């Protein structure tokens, strides 16, 4: 049976996205949010210096439609400023300083991507701007442009809870890598695991990211049956890491990548063929042209 255009797009992108089939890959959530100030250049640089190779970060659009890295809708919690990011100009943001960084400003996505590129790292970029805003489509275009401009398109997957954003990104690019995200509640609202997997496949996503508490022993196999990879967020304890590894997940977003090597790393899922690859040094990262994403180092 011939592939649909969406399936062809997803297959093409999959050939360039991360190869994590040998075991659970650990991803530094917001740069390692329990280790350093989240989504800061300080966090990303320190994590790179520690040898971590895969990062999750969040992106918003400013009033000027520049893309910046921050999790919340407002700057209040993590900076000395106040207000919604979409209502602040680039000049406004330039006067804001992140807490705990000794005067560091809010990072631009371009700068973070260039940092990752220069170190051979890979990333999960989560879309935080709403699909219901007039600037949404322009920001989606800007995101694709930033990934292409930085040379990080092949080494990045773009994730979102709002699947309308993923649908727009797929329409704009046949090669962008996409990750559909669902919380435990969202999984139920979408009608359960089977319908969620089907929806992610219809979007042309390569990965499905689920809240870790919603994942059971058979989840990974069911996801892989539909040619998707399974990621989880955000277990932070070694025992939780070990449980996810035993279930055969492909990648684990965690605030504590430094604890990855203290988990019991022996998987029990037959989908992993009895092998684990939870950690590897940065020296093992392949060139970005191969789009192979590796994991955080043995510690």
Image (tube, rainbow, N blue to C red):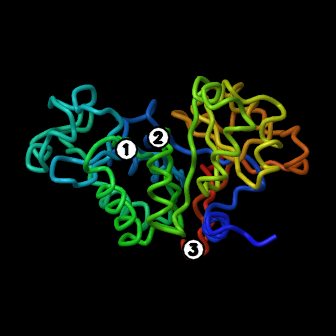
Q: Residue at x 22, y 39 (%)?
A: 85
The label on residue 131 is 1
Q: Quadrant of the N terminus?
A: bottom right
Q: Who comes first in sequence, dot 3 or dot 2?
A: 2
Question: What secondary structure is found at the residue carrying circle 1?
Answer: loop
Q: Residue at x 28, y 43 (%)?
A: 133
Residue named by callout 3: 287
Q: Nearer the viewer, mark 1 or mark 3?
A: 1
Residue 168's quadrant in the figure?
A: bottom left
Disc 1, disc 2: CB below 8 Å? yes
Residue named by callout 2: 162
Q: Is residue 154 above or below residue 131?
A: below
The reply to whether residue 63 is in sight is: yes
Mark 2 neighbour density, 10 Å: few (under 14) some (14–19) many (20 or more): some
What percent of the width, then of the height, locates residue 207?
A: 64, 50
Mark 3 neighbour density, 10 Å: few (under 14) some (14–19) many (20 or more): few
How far is disc 1 from disc 3 in space, using C-alphas?
Answer: 34 Å
Q: Residue at x 78, y 55 (%)?
A: 22
């Amino acid at each position: 049976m011939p592939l649909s255009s969406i399936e062809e797009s997803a297959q093409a992108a999959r050939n360039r996205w991360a190869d994590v089939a040998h075991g659970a890959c650990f991803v530094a959530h917001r740069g390692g949010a329990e280790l350093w100030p989240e989504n800061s250049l300080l966090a990303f640089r320190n994590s790179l210096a520690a040898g971590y190779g895969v990062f999750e970060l969040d992106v918003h659009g400013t009033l000027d439609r520049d893309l910046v890295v921050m999790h919340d809708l407002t700057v209040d919690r993590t900076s000395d400023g106040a207000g919604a990011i979409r209502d602040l100009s680039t000049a406004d943001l330039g006067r804001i300083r992140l807490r705990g960084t000794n005067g560091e400003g809010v990072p631009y996505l371009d700068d973070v991507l260039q940092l990752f590129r220069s170190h051979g790292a890979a990333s999960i970029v989560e879309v935080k701007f709403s699909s219901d805003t007039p600037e949404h489509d322009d920001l989606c275009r800007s995101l694709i442009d930033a990934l292409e401009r930085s040379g990080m398109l092949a080494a990045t997957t773009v994730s979102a809870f709002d699947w309308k954003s993923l649908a727009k990104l797929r329409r704009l690019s046949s090669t962008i890598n996409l990750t559909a995200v669902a919380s435990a509640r969202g999984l139920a609202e979408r009608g359960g695991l089977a319908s969620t997997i089907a929806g992610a496949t219809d979007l042309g996503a390569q990965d499905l990211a689920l809240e870790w508490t919603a994942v059971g022993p058979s989840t990974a196999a069911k996801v892989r049956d539909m040619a998707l990879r399974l990621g989880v967020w955000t277990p932070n304890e070694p025992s939780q890491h070990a449980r996810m590894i035993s279930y055969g997940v492909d990648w684990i977003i965690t605030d504590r990548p430094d604890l990855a090597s203290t988990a019991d790393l022996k998987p029990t899922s037959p989908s992993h063929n009895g092998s684990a690859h939870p950690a590897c040094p940065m020296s093992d990262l392949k060139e970005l042209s191969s789009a192979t994403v590796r994991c955080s180092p043995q510690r």
